[in-house]
């Protein structure tokens, strides 16, 4: 058995990575340390910790560690382990986006120009990132149209040119109609344009156009004029350039009581070329510096193309180690800056302002929903967590329940749960509801950091007043069981979701049978909530039914195995006939006691 106190004594005073496991051996946290001995021990001391770390420590069953030579190696290993295992208590990037680039295989005889999201060390030239695949594709289409380079993905010599040649969209290098040198000149111009070097090319084309006009080669002059206009247009449209000393990523952070938003601006060649944002939850008491540090680790791990500078308002811990790691990855110097004045500070502030706007816009709709719910349900506080329950069975067989969660105005299917009824043997939805809600409440009370999370603010029942009363009784019973010592348990409000005769959601009702009028938006949300929990419950019921089609209500009765079940069915023919017989008749079957017979008669 793993003894944490003993293992803490064995920790070396060396740099490395530590890995925390729960009782199921699942990795729940990965961290790095200059000194494993000091860092890992600190988790188990009575010092101030964030709520997230307190929750993590409560679940630690055992830990392991890997010793490395230096802090940079520890950082790289930590990043890789986080990316591979995605531990619950690390700050995680949930949206692992890759950005579009324009790629030119300059080593080919007749290079192609196309959009890619994979950056390889293959000698090709990459230009980007672009704000979207659409904008990158538009640029490529424009270049191919104006420069008439090949359209085909795989280059092969042919016995006749394709349609693109005949409609003047390609110069048919596959037929030898253009030499490698002439084609290369076109590619060099495209590279210069995407590099942002337009003036030299435009001046050269101006001279060529004048020379063609003097020689009365008007068709050629018109072609050069059109190309010049196209390049000028590309210069106006261009949002990106190749990696230069002016390449900067600008990171801004904003937060509210629910979420953190990080906005990242891409500045290439002194132009703001695009932006992206990421959201993180449950980080209320984490410092900005720590959140930014965790973001930088995950965002830049494995990136083939890195900026020259990363700018942000707060200086992150161990900045030097980060710079050393990024410099090694890029093969050139990469700096992390916290500007204090001037244009760069204004750029960081712009990123932060945009992060706030992005966060406000995302939160507004949810906040409006929560505010409206709070008002129509007459609640004292925001209903940030609402749970909904539904019972599913078929004539008393395979009785199950589904639970769905709405958190901060969003239905979270990943937080849904399923229950198999354990104590109810007859078809009694009210008793089933009482059992399931009681079990659910006890889970949060017994396992404060368990998978069910915190107690709900509100419970919705898929049903009317009888289901509401069942849930209220469950809450009161659990509260009494814990001697009324559980905070907020008796404050949970309960409502029913009732349907019309067409099985469509009609309204919410309270414990006094009062119907609550809802707006169209709220009605749509409640309908989706009710449909989702019903789908979860019926799906689990179907799964159990398909798994064992011969199962019935008597399979749930303790003391009845395959032999007794077969004997009962041979005598009565069906579960329904058993439930309508007498105790004496049931006891005529070998092995059926009076106690078992009484349970069979409870089946309805």
Image (cartoon, grey):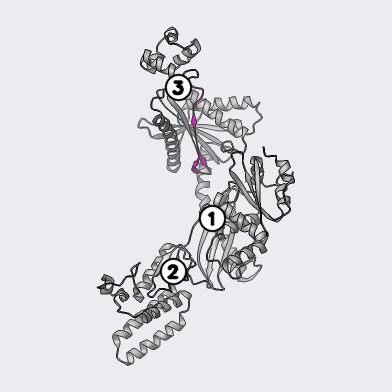
Q: Which residue is mark 2?
A: 103
- The quarter in which the C terminus is drawn is top left
Which is nearer the N-term, disc 2 or disc 3?
2
Q: Determine whether 595 is above or below 276 in the image.
A: above
Q: Residues within 10 Å of mark 1 (few under 14, many from 20)?
A: some
Describe the element under mark 1 as helix, strand or loop.
Answer: strand
Q: CA distance from mark 2 to mark 3?
A: 64 Å
Task: Tell me the SS state at disc 3.
Answer: helix
Q: Magenta-highlighted stretch: main secondary structure?
A: strand
Residue under numbered circle 1: 278
Q: Which residues are magenta?
A: 403-427
Left or right, 402 with respect to 316, comes to: left
Residue sitting at x 48%, y 24%: 430
Q: CA distance from mark 2 to mark 1?
A: 27 Å
> Which circle's residue, 2 or 1, is located before the other in the chain?
2
Mark 1 or 3, closer to the camera: 3
Q: Residue furthest bottom?
A: 214
- Above or below: residue 75 compared with residue 122: above
Residue 316 visible from this viewpoint: no
Q: Position of residue 155 (x, y in %)?
A: 34, 70
């Amino acid at each position: 058995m793993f003894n944490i106190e003993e293992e803490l004594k064995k920790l070396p005073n060396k740099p490395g990575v530590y890995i925390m496991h729960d009782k199921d051996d699942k990795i729940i946290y990965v961290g790095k340390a200059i000194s494993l001995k000091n860092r890992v021990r600190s988790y188990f001391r009575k010092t101030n910790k964030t709520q997230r770390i307190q929750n993590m420590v409560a679940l630690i069953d055992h830990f392991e560690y890997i010793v490395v030579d230096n802090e940079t190696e520890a950082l790289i290993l930590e990043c890789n382990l986080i990316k591979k295992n995605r531990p619950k208590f690390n700050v995680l990037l949930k949206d692992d986006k890759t950005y579009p680039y324009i790629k030119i295989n300059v080593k080919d005889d007749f290079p192609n120009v196309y959009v890619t999201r994979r950056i390889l060390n293959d000698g090709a030239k990459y230009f980007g990132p672009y704000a979207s695949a659409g904008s990158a594709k538009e640029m490529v289409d424009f270049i191919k149209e104006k420069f008439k380079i090949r359209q085909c993905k795989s280059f092969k010599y042919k016995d006749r040119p394709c349609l693109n040649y005949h409609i003047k969209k390609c110069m048919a290098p596959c037929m030898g109609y253009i030499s490698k040198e002439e084609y290369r000149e076109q590619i060099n111009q495209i590279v210069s344009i995407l590099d942002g070097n337009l003036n030299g090319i435009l001046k050269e084309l101006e001279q060529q156009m004048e020379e063609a006009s003097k020689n009365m080669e008007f068709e050629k002059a018109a072609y050069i004029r059109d190309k010049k206009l196209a390049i000028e247009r590309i210069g106006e449209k261009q949002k990106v350039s190749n990696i230069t000393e002016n390449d900067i990523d600008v990171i801004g952070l904003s937060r509210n009581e629910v979420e953190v938003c990080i906005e990242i601006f891409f500045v290439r060649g002194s132009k703001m070329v695009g932006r992206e944002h990421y959201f993180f939850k449950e980080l209320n008491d984490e410092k900005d510096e720590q959140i930014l540090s965790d973001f930088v680790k995950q965002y830049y791990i494995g990136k083939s193309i890195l900026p020259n500078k990363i700018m942000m308002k707060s200086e992150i811990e161990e900045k030097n180690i980060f710079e050393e790691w990024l410099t090694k990855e890029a093969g050139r110097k990469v700096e992390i800056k916290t500007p204090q004045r001037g244009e760069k500070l204004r750029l960081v502030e712009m990123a932060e302002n945009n992060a706030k706007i992005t966060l406000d816009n995302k939160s507004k709709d949810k906040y409006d929903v929560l505010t409206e719910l709070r008002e129509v349900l007459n609640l004292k506080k925001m209903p940030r967590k609402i749970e909904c329950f539904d019972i599913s069975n078929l004539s008393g067989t395979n009785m199950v329940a589904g639970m769905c969660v709405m958190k901060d105005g969003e239905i979270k299917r990943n937080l849904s749960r399923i229950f198999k009824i354990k104590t109810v043997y007859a078809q009694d939805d009210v008793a089933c509801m009482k059992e399931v809600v009681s079990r659910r409440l006890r889970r949060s009370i017994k396992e404060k950091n368990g998978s069910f999370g915190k107690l709900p603010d509100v419970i919705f029942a898929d049903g009317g007043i009888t289901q509401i009363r069942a849930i209220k009784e469950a809450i009161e019973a659990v509260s009494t069981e814990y001697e009324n010592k559980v905070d907020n348990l008796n404050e949970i409000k309960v409502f029913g979701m009732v349907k019309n005769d067409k099985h469509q959601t009609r309204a919410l009702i309270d414990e006094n049978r009062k119907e609550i009028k809802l707006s169209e938006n709220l009605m749509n949300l409640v309908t989706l909530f009710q449909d989702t929990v019903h789908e979860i419950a019926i799906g689990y019921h179907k799964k159990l039914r398909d798994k064992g089609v011969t199962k019935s209500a008597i399979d749930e009765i303790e003391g009845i195995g395959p032999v007794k079940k077969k004997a009962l069915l041979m005598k009565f023919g069906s579960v329904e006939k058993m439930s309508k017989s007498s105790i004496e008749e049931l006891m005529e079957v070998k092995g059926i006691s009076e106690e078992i017979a009484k349970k069979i008669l409870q089946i309805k």
